[in-house]
Amino acid sequence: MDFAAFAERADELEAEEADLATVGLVAGALADADGDLDVVARFLQGRVFPGWDTRKLAVGPSLCHEAIARAAGTNVTADDVEDRLADTGEIGAVAASYDFGGQTGLAAFGAGGAEGNGGIPAGADGADDATGGTDLTVREVFESFERVAAAEGAGSEDVRRDVLFGLFNRASPAEAKYLARLVLGEMRVGVGGGTVRDAVAEAFLGADVTTPVEDRPEGDDADELVAAVEAALQVTNNFGRVAELAREEGVDGLRDVSLEVGRPVRAMLAQAGTVTGALAEWDEAAVETKYDGARVQLHYDGEEASVYSRNMEDVTDALPELVEHAETHLAVPAIVDGEAVAVGEDGEPLPFQEILRRFRRKHDVDRLREEVTVELRAFDCLHADGEDLLDAPLTERYARLSDALAEGVSELLVTTDPERIEAVEAKALAAGHEGIMLKNPDSTYSPGKRGRNWLKRKPDVETLDLVVTGAEWGEGRRANYLGTFLLSARNGDASGRSPDARETGSRKGFETIGKVATGITDEQLAELTELLEPHVVREEGTDVEIRPEVVFEVGYEEIQASPTYSSGYALRFPRFVEVRTDKDPADADSLERVERLADAQ
Ligand code: AMP
């Protein structure tokens, strides 16, 4: 596929707001991608490499700006690019604003002769046909990115810059827009993994995903086909391969894919939760220690082991103890999920920082191994003895883990009794661990998902109940939702019920303390917008002032002194917990309590 055609599709996607129409456009792009299907499936999401692939572009904004500047002409500097970026706020628009005239002369010479065009075949300069497209292809762009990722050692930065220069130098403005966005990993066309998944089902499995659910005929199998794509994605972590399989072998091909030892899978993640909530939802809960270490995935093929981090980085060389552990204690080939913990001389857990010292270590591993010992606490098993276990319930996976691994398996208790759970927690805390994990005993393993089947219950951290006194409208696809919420604490003896504050919408009696935007799902954004919109008293640009009516419970990591907000404090990493529908602004937390909590830290 020509890169110009890709850019045109991306522009259409950017302009499209409706989700179903977006799926339709992506399905069209995939259907037309031919031999570039794998790359197109990733590029549309702003991904260059498959999820399991540990390669990275390693291009920061300044390097990208330099490459753009050099391709834009001898009189353009990275500072000019950054000035334009400050004006437009978006690198794609900046890249598209230059006329890359094919700097094959002086600038390329300055870039170091033959390397100057990034090794891309010559004879291609800027927009060279009537439509403004070039002969750059999606595959060539990908191959250039591969060269960028492969650059290593002294001079690697020059190589990266030169290759990027070569790409921009050949690009039309429309192409440059998406080159720049891809390089910096911000496609911004509203295509995420779910969209590509649905589009694969639409394009290659005949699923009618773009018809609204309520209008689909009875017995429609679209959901089933989408689920088959999703399952294959979880197993392979590779959009390109799944799209190709769907196209070439249909749903049967997808159902046949299996995990591969040596290819990391995304880790299942946890949400915060409570014991009461867990028992109410599942009746029985599986409870285990929450270790304060670093997540690891151990792959053992029957002879050799490799270790991957939570981000699927290969950390085998840094953690020889875990390799030895797997090779000694695993009875069968397996993929094991667990935590690497640092332990002191008498086996007590050491703080998280200690494991970090070991984790990405490339040199002196042996010396450091003497100082910090790393041990495995295995808690899950994704594959054992040739069998994939993602679809098996937790209790079965745990049984397989215990059978396969002779040592280093974390203890698991399945119970309906909150007191026994609390006893496990007390023991874990007393032993110096972080807390406990609660897991749904019947749940399957969902790679990459932060669902409600794994809950982390840390010892209660204080939350604050704060009043919403302002908000900001979102951007792009979220333009119709209030997205960022300004929070205030009740001030001193002001009751918050002051007629002033309620009726004039003034923020009298409240002092601002921070803004919260995380911890809110898309669904909640819609609900919160509906809840708060009636209380809007003033709007200026995207800023909105809100009458103090609604109380949010908010978690945070720390309270800091800060001149930014009128309270004199700011919350570090504030996160939305829930709307306290049971509370009035007068019941919200006072500045006095904030002060006390800040002092107690
Ligand atoms: P958090 O990083 O706070 O979101 O908590 C989730 C992380 O806790 C996981 O990614 C693991 O690295 C870690 N963890 C520690 N012990 C366990 C356990 N028993 N089960 C699952 N995750 C655990």
Image (cartoon, grey):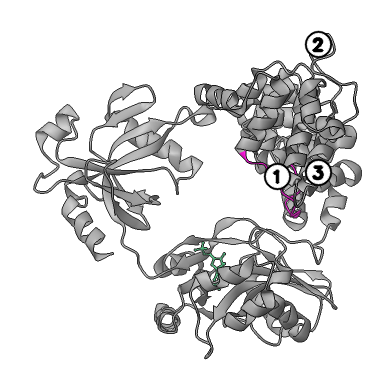
Q: Is mark 2 within 8 Å of ligand 1?
A: no
Left or right: where does residue 215 sit relative to residue 418?
right
Horizontal and vertical percent position of residue 374: 61, 79
Q: Which mark is residue 131?
A: 2
Q: Residues within 10 Å of mark 3 (few under 14, many from 20)?
A: some
Quarter of the view holding residue 286:
bottom right
Q: Earlier in the sequence, mark 1 or mark 2?
A: 2
| Residue interval drawn in magenta | 48-60
Q: Secondary structure at mark 2?
A: loop
Q: Residues within 10 Å of mark 2 (few under 14, many from 20)?
A: few
Looking at the rendered image, the quarter that the N terminus falls into is: top right
Give the dominant element type of the magenta stretch: helix, strand or loop: loop
The structure residue drawn at horizontal position 62% and vertical position 68%, both measured from the top left corner, is 359
Q: Which mark is residue 223?
A: 1
Residue carrying label 3: 146
Q: Residues within 10 Å of mark 1 (few under 14, many from 20)?
A: some
Q: Residue furthest bottom?
A: 346
Along the viewing direction, whichever of 145 and 551 lies nearer the viewer: 145
